[in-house]
Image: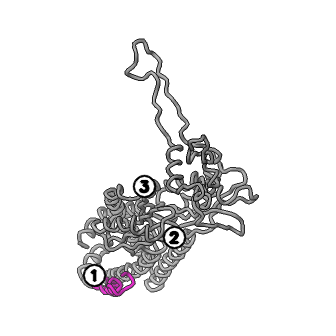
């Protein structure tokens, strides 16, 4: 192989040019993160059953989902949890190497089979299946500096206008809102409910019957009478619009003409859908949402995309409301990578300086100066094909690789120089003869230096 490229220098330069090109194309496509993702891929399943106890949640929802998950392909294990707020979380962990998107699709397909058996409230709220990294990339907050908006209003605006926009950004796997939308709250007085001989099911049935969205149809639609030429679509206001209308819902109509309405047994008002979170930023009322990365996403690029979109959305924020980013991990990723890049450049500069001091020849020093960047660019192309990311460990690996490249270059250059000085050979002849003499030695040097890192790949090593 060395003789092939020695006799075809133009072909060697073309190969080097392609390596450079592939490396430059691969660098923007590589995900950037602080540490490599060594944990198996996971899929998060969340369900909500308001008012249910953990035991009820486990029997009616979690148990059904767990039994169906057992047959999902490449599943290692799963763990579930339920709390007193009626929320449940199931984290399914898959074998390393499993495609996260395909695992998510498999889980969704399995959940479709048991969806009819879930309680109606759970089906209405939806069972969310998401694939995202466990840590938070950043936390986005909304505040009202002048106190014009309370936490409920901030959370409602965040839920309806910002979180969905953030979910569309490339690299975002999940947006978790630490708040709740605005909702109509019916606070029932148990004593009054008992006095009127009513139950909660009576209230629920009355709300369902008198707050329904229906399709009234059209007047004059086919089949129509002869001469009928006008068709009029009908509009019916079936859904109630404000708390006063809900307060007027009839719970029971008596034979004497009297009736019991919702306001007789409950207080109706607009409030939060849930009161599980209380947010404060610098002591002031606020709301927040956490952004989590999708598996294999570029942390720096995703954080920049989120900030750019927030800046665009800030132009339409109501007066007295502003956004903030109180927590973000992307700067730490940037700093870590920058420090390693500085180390990489310093290592290259020191190596070339040492070579120049010992070889006393600019030309000999320029040879590894050209070879090292080409080899590193080729490494980026291989990293993209292998599914690696630019992180602290891969960059430090390149720092070590520079030493191996320069060691091999020194051995070759010194042997070529020796043959040119002692036997008077031309550079091409000396290179050809030198490679025949030391090809085995160069390969042996590389293998020995590489073998030092083989224990890192064992199950007991840090890669496990």
Q: Residues within 10 Å of mark 3 (few under 14, many from 20)?
A: few
Q: The residue tagged with tag 1: helix, strand or loop? A: helix
Q: Are marks 1 and 3 in contact (CB under 8 Å)?
A: no
Front label number (1 vs 3): 3
- Residue most toward the right? 146
Q: Upstream in the sequence, badge 1 or badge 3? A: 3
Residue highlighted by disc 2: 84
Q: Is residue 147 left or right of residue 158?
A: right
Asked if residue 459 lies in the magenta stretch, the reply is: yes
In the picture, the disc for residue 120 is 3
Q: Are marks 3 and 2 in contact (CB under 8 Å)?
A: no
The foreground one among 409 and 198 is: 198
- Residue most toward the front? 256
Q: Quadrant of the N terminus?
A: bottom left
Estimate the spatial distance between the alpha carbons at disc 3 and disc 2, rounded to whole Å.
19 Å
Q: Quadrant of residue 163?
A: bottom right
Q: Is residue 440 above or below residue 198?
A: below
Q: Which residues are magenta?
A: 442-464
Residue 232: tell me if it is visible.
Answer: yes
Q: Position of residue 190 (x, y in %)?
A: 59, 61
Q: Are marks 1 and 2 in contact (CB under 8 Å)?
A: no
Estimate the spatial distance between the alpha carbons at disc 1 and disc 3, rounded to whole Å.
68 Å
Front label number (1 vs 2): 2
Residue 309: tell me if it is visible.
Answer: no
Give me the residue at 58% from left, 56% from top.
Answer: 181
The foreground one among 343 and 355 is: 343
Q: The residue tagged with tag 2: helix, strand or loop? A: loop
Residue highlighted by disc 1: 443
Asked if residue 446 lies in the magenta stretch, the reply is: yes
């Amino acid at each position: 192989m060395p003789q092939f490229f020695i006799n075809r220098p133009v072909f060697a330069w073309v190969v080097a040019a392609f390596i450079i090109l592939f490396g430059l194309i691969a660098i923007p496509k590589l995900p950037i993160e602080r540490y490599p993702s060594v944990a198996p891929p996971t899929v998060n399943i969340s369900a909500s059953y308001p008012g249910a106890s953990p035991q009820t949640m486990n029997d009616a929802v979690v148990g059904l989902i767990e039994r169906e998950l057992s047959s999902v392909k490449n599943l290692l294990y799963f763990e579930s949890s339920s709390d007193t707020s009626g929320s449940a979380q199931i984290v399914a962990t898959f074998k390393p190497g499993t495609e996260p998107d395909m695992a998510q699709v498999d889980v969704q397909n399995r959940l479709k089979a048991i969806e009819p058996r879930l309680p109606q409230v759970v089906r209405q709220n939806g069972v969310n299946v998401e694939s995202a990294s466990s840590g938070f990339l950043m936390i986005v907050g909304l505040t009202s500096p002048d106190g014009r908006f309370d936490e409920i209003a901030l959370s409602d605006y965040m839920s309806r206008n910002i979180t969905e926009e953030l979910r569309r950004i490339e690299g975002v796997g999940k947006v978790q809102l630490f708040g709740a939308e605005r909702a109509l709250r019916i606070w029932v007085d148990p004593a009054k409910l008992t006095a009127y001989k009513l139950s909660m099911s009576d209230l629920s049935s009355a709300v369902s019957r008198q707050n329904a969205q229906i399709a009234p149809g059209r007047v004059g639609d086919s089949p129509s009478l002869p001469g009928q030429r006008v068709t009029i679509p009908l509009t019916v206001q079936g859904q109630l619009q404000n708390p006063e209308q809900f307060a007027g819902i009839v719970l029971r109509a008596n034979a004497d003409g009297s009736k019991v309405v919702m306001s007789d047994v409950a207080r109706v008002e607009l409030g939060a859908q849930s009161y599980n979170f209380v947010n404060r930023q610098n002591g002031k009322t606020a709301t927040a949402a956490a952004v989590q990365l999708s598996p294999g996403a570029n942390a720096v690029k995703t954080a920049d995309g989120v900030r750019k979109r927030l800046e665009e959305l800030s132009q339409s924020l109501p007066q007295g409301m502003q956004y903030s980013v109180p927590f973000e991990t992307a700067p730490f990723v940037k700093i870590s990578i920058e420090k390693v890049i500085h180390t990489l450049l310093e290592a290259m500069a020191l190596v070339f300086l040492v070579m120049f001091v010992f070889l006393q020849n600019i030309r000999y020093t320029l040879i590894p100066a050209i070879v090292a960047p080409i080899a590193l660019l080729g490494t980026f192309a291989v990293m993209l094909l292998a599914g690696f990311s630019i992180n602290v460990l891969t960059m430090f690996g390149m720092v070590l690789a520079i030493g191996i490249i320069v060691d091999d270059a020194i051995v070759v250059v010194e042997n070529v120089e020796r043959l040119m000085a002692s036997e008077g050979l031309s550079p091409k002849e000396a290179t050809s003869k030198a490679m025949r003499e030391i090809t085995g030695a160069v390969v042996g040097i590389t293998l020995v230096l590489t073998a030092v890192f083989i224990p890192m790949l064992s199950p007991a090593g840090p890669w496990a």
